[in-house]
Image: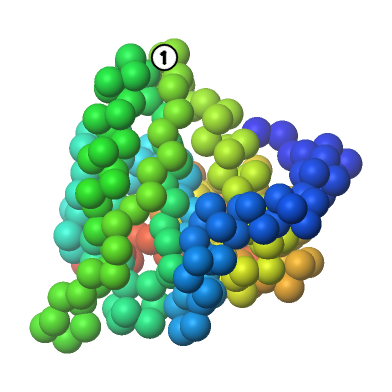
Amino acid sequence: MEIHQGGILKSTKDRLSSALHRAYSELMGFARNPPTALRDRSVMFIDGENILLRYEAMVAAGRRSSGIIKHSVGRYVWDEEIFSSPRECPYRICYYTAAAGDDDALETLRSEIAKLHFGGRSGTERFSEGTLTPFVFKKEVRRTKTKSVDINLTTDLLRTAYSGAVEHVIVLSGDGDYLPVYEEVMRRGVRVTVGAFSSGLNPLIPPRVDLFWDLDLEFFARLPT
């Protein structure tokens, strides 16, 4: 994915009219359900291809998973207990991925992802705050990474930042190609948290976002000291 200040960012700015802002807010549910609590001012975006690739690489290297991990090999991965309190949960979690196959195969994957919960455990009590919102795109070859995920996640992330409906975005991806997008979002006054695995992490990400979230600690058992 190649993103330049004079390219996709500028063209996206030019297209974001006030009418589009209103339409997008309604689509995301903000206009119908105005956010009130702090958690309602944040949205998470997951690069499912990146997260799955890095998770499976770490499992292949011998790391043992922990938590309530929902994993379908080559399709998706998610931790249903990733948050430690309901207040940490975002308003919505958007999961972007791509898959080979016909329309029925894509719809099956979309339905499976839509059943995945997000929540966590506070003490001995488990809580669930909602389910993932899937965005599944078609690709021709199973083992290749597509541009569809990168482009659509970037577009939705920028639209969300420009809508003025959120104060905080969380992106799960270790891909450094999103860095110019993060910088643009932060210039809009929106706080950016990025979560990623150590495997394949672009080292420029942690120092250049507001907060870095080490997903190794959420998805895997601690390494012996």
Q: Position of residue 68 (x, y in %)?
A: 17, 60
Quadrant where the C terminus is found in the figure: bottom left
Q: Position of residue 20 (x, y in %)?
A: 71, 50
Q: Quadrant of residue 198?
A: bottom left
Element class at badge 1? loop
Q: Quadrant of residue 214?
A: bottom left
Q: As rendered, which of 134 and 139 lies closer to the eye?
A: 134
Question: Which residue appears at 23% of the width and 33% of the height?
Answer: 73
Q: Is residue 113 left or right of residue 96?
A: left
What amino acid does circle 1 point to? Val
Q: Position of residue 89 (x, y in %)?
A: 38, 72
Near mark 1 (Cα within 10 A), the count class, few <14, some 14-19 or many ≥20, is few
Q: Residue furthest left?
A: 124
- Image coloring type: rainbow
Q: As rendered, which of 90 and 16 lies closer to the eye?
A: 16
Q: Is residue 161 left or right of residue 140?
A: right
Q: As rendered, which of 205 and 170 lies closer to the eye?
A: 170
Location of residue 167 with respect to 7 vertically, above or below: below
Question: Which residue appears at 41% of the width and 58% of the height?
Answer: 93
Q: Do we see residue 61 in this rendering? A: no
Q: Do we see residue 178 in this rendering? A: yes
Q: Which residue is mark 1?
A: 141
Q: Position of residue 185 (x, y in %)?
A: 71, 61
